[in-house]
Image (cartoon, helix red, strand yellow):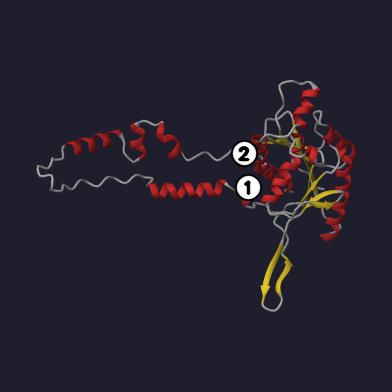
Amino acid sequence: MSNAPTREHVASRPTTPAADPEIVATAYISNDAVNRRAGLNKREARKQKKAQQSLPTPDDTSSETETPAAKPPNNPPKARKARQAQNADTASIPQSLAVAMPPANPLPLLICSIGNPGPQYANTLHSAGHIVTTYIAGRKSYQPFTKGLSGLVSRPDNTTFSLSLLKGYSKTQGGPPEEDWTFWQSLSLMNVSGVGVKKAYAAWLAELRRRISPAQEGRLVIVHDELESALGKVTVRESGASARGHNGLKSCQQQLGSVKWWRVGVGIGRPDSRDPNVVSRYVLGKMRPQEMDGLERAAPAVVDALRMIAEK
């Protein structure tokens, strides 16, 4: 297996695209700023005001006086509206997920998320890895998670459908995906998740070598919650780094032994108190909508981290 970068990589949490300043700033900017945005400096603004004041006033109200055409602004309303609509469409799909930018020779990845199984622990901060991998797989139009490799598996969906008058709809498999990623979710409790990860990695690697070649390499990545990081912050470390009290990572380190793998942590914040009971209630409590939103907004940074790990 080839060597990967040994330095710790920290990716900043992605933020929501800023609102259009054309809309937000108008209530707070000065008149000078308005003139500048319309393509006028202070001197030109005074000249225009003086010219308007010197125009003759018509004696006959029925007559018409032709006034000079106003200089069109640099950002006409139609152009602004078109740009705002375009920004709104782009913001609805994270750029890193909507546009595939794989490296030249990426290695296949088995991306394992660890957490706690069942509805009792669904949508809790301790299962942030499951939430992020489910979100990414859905946005990349992967197949739904189904049982496989001693857990739940989601693979690229390269199925295409064609219609003919004689045969009707027929289903075919397309070419290989741009990114050969397999998402896997643990079905065991967090503290013993290493057992399932070890089985899944062995089965996936054997399957990969049957499918491609006996010498094919692949990399194992574990996505997990990170209590000491701010909500949505993404960090990348190698397998030998300290588990920082995370029992799920400790289990993986014990079970995988000398296998080299990578960790992608997704920050979940932490309560003010370090009392174990308070921390337990925090990580196992159901998430609020803003916390779920924060984890989903971390997805583009997680995708970027996975692409970095896949590079040779």
Residue 312, image x, y percentages: 74, 49
Q: Residue at x 10, y 44 (%)?
A: 60
Question: Pointers 2 and 1 in contact (CB under 8 A)?
Answer: yes
Q: Which residue lies furthest to the bottom in this view?
A: 166
Q: Residue furthest front?
A: 120
Disc 2 residue type (three-letter): Pro
Disc 1 residue type (three-letter): Ser
Residue 197, image x, y percentages: 85, 44
- Residue at image mark 1: 96
Whether residue 207 sits left or right of residue 96 in the image: it is right
Residue 145, image x, y percentages: 77, 51
Q: Residue at x 69, y 47 (%)?
A: 136
Q: How crowded is mark 2: few (under 14 residues within 10 Å), some or many (20 or more)?
A: some
Q: Is mark 2 on a helix, strand or loop?
A: loop
- Above or below residue 190? Residue 204 is below
Separation (CA) of disc 2 from disc 1: 10 Å
Whether residue 66 sits left or right of residue 164 in the image: it is left
Q: Residue at x 41, y 49 (%)?
A: 79
The numbered mark, 2 or 1, whose residue comes first in the sequence reads 2
Nearer to me, 307 or 125: 125
Q: What element carries label 1?
A: helix
Nearer to me, 149 or 308: 149
What's the mark number on residue 14?
Answer: 2
Nearer to me, 276 or 179: 276
